[in-house]
Image (spheres, helix red, strand yellow):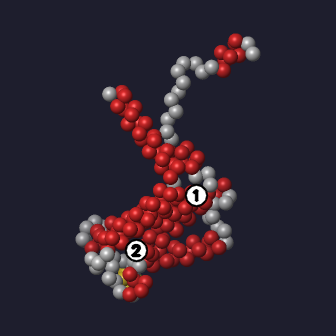
Amino acid sequence: MSADAVDQKQPAGPAKEERFALADAYRRHFENPRRERAFLHAAGFTIGFAGCRLVTHAIRAQRGPFKNLSVGGRHLHHSTPGIIGQITLGYLWTWQVAVGTDPKKRAASRVASLTAGVATALTLDEFALWFDLQDDYWTEQGRKSIDAVVLFWGLSAMGLSGRGVLTECGKALRDVRRDKRARS
């Protein structure tokens, strides 16, 4: 190999510093569609449960634009859309629709997984209604601990299924802080 050929392969100037890109990290860590669906389901559950708690507390405190929904004078519990969502997704998945096995159709799988997580959160958030058939949703007994346990479960599931991308994100944040300190 001639000296000219070696010089042509060398980059001109200093090597470019690789920057962290969340989209690239996400693609690397979620190449397996099953792992991605598990993470998205857990994320949908966590976001859905936290959102549900915020909205129901706002309704109870009469803050913001939120109001209870009624159909024909009957209160519509948020478990109803959750159950409908679970039934619909179960039917679709029975027919292998939006399961993420086709690389060209992973968008539908992502949406379905997030939706399944949210539907599960809406349904489980009113768990007391399953057995008592009473709206004792706001009793103090155990409500805070149930909220904490369920949110902990959702965050844990996200951490387990997404640990690789979360670790990479943490390292990137650490590197950014280190670079800022070095420049100061």
Q: Kindly tell me whether residue 67 is visible in this rendering.
A: no
Residue 85 percent location from the top left of the image: 52, 73
Where the C terminus falls, by quadrant? top left
Please tell me whether residue 141 is drawn above or below residue 53 in the rendered image.
Answer: below
Q: Secondary structure at mark 2?
A: loop
Crowding near the residue tagged with mark 1, few <14, some 14–19, many ≥20 C-alpha atoms within 10 Å: some
Crowding near the residue tagged with mark 2, few <14, some 14–19, many ≥20 C-alpha atoms within 10 Å: many
Q: Which amino acid, mark 1?
A: Arg
Which disc is residue 169 wearing? Answer: none
User: Picture quarter containing residue 52?
Assistant: bottom left
Which disc is residue 125 wearing? Answer: 2
In depth, the one of 179 and 53 nearer the eye is 179
Q: Which amino acid, mark 2?
A: Asp
In depth, the one of 57 and 158 nearer the eye is 158
Counting residues from the start of the chain, the first of labels 1 and 2 encountered is 1
Residue farthest top in this picture: 3
Residue at 53% across, 21% down: 14
Residue at which label 1 appears:
35
Where the N terminus falls, by quadrant? top right
Q: Are marks 1 and 2 in contact (CB under 8 Å)?
A: no
Residue 47 percent location from the top left of the image: 42, 62
